[in-house]
Image: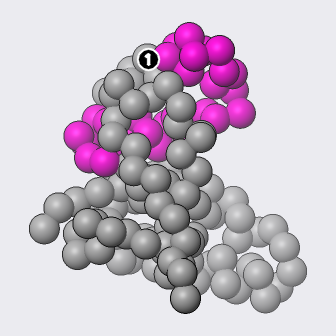
Amino acid sequence: MSTFVLDTCALIDLGVVELGEYADGIAAVTSITIGELAFGVDLGDPAQQTERSALLRSAITDHEILTFGVEEARLYGVMAALVRAAARSPRPRRLDLQIAATAAAARLPLLTTNPKDFVGTDRLVDIVPLTRATR
């Protein structure tokens, strides 16, 4: 059984995406994703806050959490430079790049519903695009 990393959007959409060959794998999330989810809890109406709080709790209890440390920070810097070299600004993608750097440091593929967020990083991390399941 293989382990993989879900980016924040993939985690949010987990019930409606096709995981393909990763369906029987072990999903990990990053501490960056936990931060994004924690921020989202305080946004929206009370019903959204309840739903987001449940997702945050589930992310913490149901998945391995990969932390962002020195190696991840170094890889983030390299990825930001690669994105800039691809004529794109790394600034709006900072959290995405930190998630990608965490996956790269763990040598795990990164599953995402937004592969465009990671253009330029494919030299360092395997980006796996996910699509919504057809019903």
Predominant SS of the magenta segment? helix
Quarter containing the C terminus: bottom right
Label 1 packing within 10 angstroms: few (<14), some (14-19), many (20+):
some
Residue ID at (28%, 35%): 105
Question: Residue 107 sits in which quadrant?
Answer: top left
Q: Nearer the viewer, residue 31 or 106?
A: 106
The amino acid type of the residue labelled 1 equals Val
Look at the picture and state if 105 lies above or below 28: above
Q: Residue furthest left?
A: 1
Q: Is residue 38 visible?
A: yes
Where's residue 132, x and y in %?
55, 71
Residue ID at (54%, 81%): 134
Where's residue 20, x and y in %?
33, 69
Quarter containing the N terminus: bottom left
Q: Is residue 56 visible?
A: no
- 33 sits left or right of 6 in the view: right
Q: Does the magenta run of residues contain 86?
A: yes
Judged from the image, the secondary structure of the residue bearing numbered disc 1 is helix
The residue stretch that appears in magenta: 81-109
Where's residue 58, x and y in %?
46, 79
> Which residue bears the numbered disc 1?
78
Q: Nearer the viewer, residue 33 or 84?
A: 84
Q: Does the magenta run of residues contain 71?
A: no
Q: Residue furthest front?
A: 134
Look at the picture and state if 45 lies above or below 87: below
